[in-house]
Amino acid sequence: DAKTTQPNSMESNEEEPVHLPCNHSTISGTDYIHWYRQLPSQGPEYVIHGLTSNVNNRMASLAIAEDRKSSTLILHRATLRDAAVYYCILRDPDYGGSQGNLIFGKGTKLSVKP
Amino acid sequence: GAVVSQHPSWVICKSGTSVKIECRSLDFQATTMFWYRQFPKQSLMLMATSNEGSKATYEQGVEKDKFLINHASLTLSTLTVTSAHPEDSSFYICSASRTKPEQYFGPGTRLTVT
């Protein structure tokens, strides 16, 4: 799997937007960009994924660079409940014919200040 | 939808005993389930991939005779830690895949071996 690079930590103020960057310069043409987050003492939670076009859902937006070598997860209004470790993961869904296990890096620990 | 449960949520056992952890997909059928382990302040590490009706595939360095995985049905996978030792104390998390590419994670089981 291609490697991703994320900042170790970021801080945000409550009610403000947060932009979490991810670099993936060795991404292949078939890799999807996934974002998961893990709240303290809980299992990871799916946030969003995309391939080429920007994506929006109820949780966040995903902005993907035109060359796909980087992406940004956007939380439009951070809340205290958004404090978590955010993981950017690349995965080819057809790799090895499996359902696709996820390889977690260290992620970005997001702190939200009231 | 897409809820995954784990039982128990936490367990304390004595060194040398065995512990069984259950992972259930509550509202969908999962042909593949994954087991992860997470030590304090570290990321998730994939232990094994469990396919219904067949033997699990273990990651390099994971002892298959120590971590027994059974995927008896499309909604249940179990992980048994045999002859547990204090170094096996960790946060064990399962995930299940319904359709690519998303995975749904359980809440985790915290194992403490005394």
Image (spheres, helix red, strand yellow):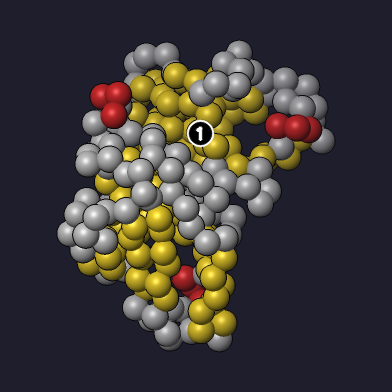
Q: Quadrant of residue B54?
A: top left
Q: Quadrant of residue B82?
A: top right
At x 34%, y 21%, the residue is: B52
Q: Position of residue B28 (x, y in %)?
A: 27, 40
Which quadrant would residue A58 be assigned to in this image?
Answer: bottom left
The residue drawn where x is 51% and y is 84% is A13
Q: What residue is disc 1 on?
A: B46
Mark 1 belongs to chain: B
Q: Which of the pair B27/B96 is nearer the observer?
A: B96
Name above or below for residue B38 compared with residue A74. Answer: above
Q: Give the image location of residue A73, x and y in percent.
A: 36, 65
Above or below, comparing residue B97 to residue B50 in the picture: below
As displayed, is residue A9 above or below residue B100? below
Where is A96 relative to A36, above or below? above
Q: Identify which residue is drawn at 43% across, 32% down.
A: B34
Q: Amino acid at mark 1?
A: Leu
Q: Position of residue B58 (x, y in %)?
A: 50, 20
**Looking at the image, can residue B5 be seen?**
no
Q: Dot 1 lies on which element?
A: strand
Q: Is residue B29 left or right of residue B4?
A: left
